[in-house]
Image: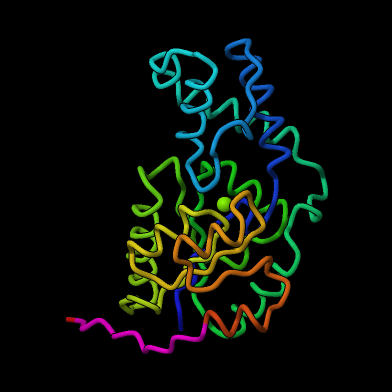
Amino acid sequence: MKLIIFDLDQTLVDFISLHEETVRRLFQEEFNVDARLTAIDFSGRSLTDNVAELARANGIDGGRVLGRMDDILASYERIFSSLMPPDPSRYVLPGVRQLLQRLTEAGHLIVLYTGDSRAIADRVLSATGLGRYFKFAVYGTESKTRLEMARLAVRKAGELAGTKFSGKDIVIIGDSLRDIECARQLPALSIGVATGVHSADNLKNAGADYVFKDLIDTEKVMLAIESFQHDSIPLIKG
Ligand SMILES: [Mg+2]
């Protein structure tokens, strides 16, 4: 059994057009400025960091934003939810459902780590029906860095499974350089998928163990995930 840690945005789903519209409306409402998510390097970062960076990029005083972050995130969640269509299946990236199904059948422990807030991620997981594949999720608004999120996921997964996951027993799958960097530091096996803004070459150069242009070829991705066989060490109990 391996621990598979998936990123959400632009790895499993692509709601960037909704996030873009949410940012536009939010910054109009709150600060009367025309902010664009895609004008900043948003990929693989937490929603909190992105909101702060968007504020800076639009000349808004950091104190005005940080002091009201909880209210701003609540507005973000309200606007994002209002934009969610009744059937968002087309926002799920190709091959994703099949891969999650295969990983489940193979008995791997699948978890999510995302820069999104809990409300946004849960909305996405329930609307798309992807939630049932994940044992739990860790959220960017509740941790300082992606590495901290991944460490928390490893600890929680170990407790759940009664097994210590380490090294290549842990697989991180994500679309951003920050996912690859996080896997390198953890350390874990890294699989980059070029369905976001960072190119396959960028992901390769960042040191990804494997890079795919998408997750369509389930067998190839399964082979990569299961390529390093190393039995995890059971925790000594009592
Ligand atoms: Mg992502």
| Residue at image point 58% right, 55% down | 8
| Residue at image point 55% right, 45% down | 43
Q: Does 181 appear above or below 33?
A: below
Most foreground residue, 79 or 228: 228
| Magenta highlight on residue 61 | no
Colour convention of the picture: rainbow
x and y percentages locating residue 12 in the rendered image: 65, 59
Name the quarter where the C terminus is drawn.
bottom left
Task: Give the quadrant of residue 63.
Answer: top left
Which residues are the magenta region? 226-237
| Residue at image point 61% right, 31% down | 39
Q: Does 79 appear above or below 229?
A: above
x and y percentages locating residue 132 in the rendered image: 62, 65
Drawn side of residue 152 relative to residue 84, left or right: left
Q: Does 202 appear above or below 78?
A: below
What's the magenta bit mostly, secondary-structure-wise?
A: loop
Task: Give the quadrant of residue 13.
Answer: bottom right
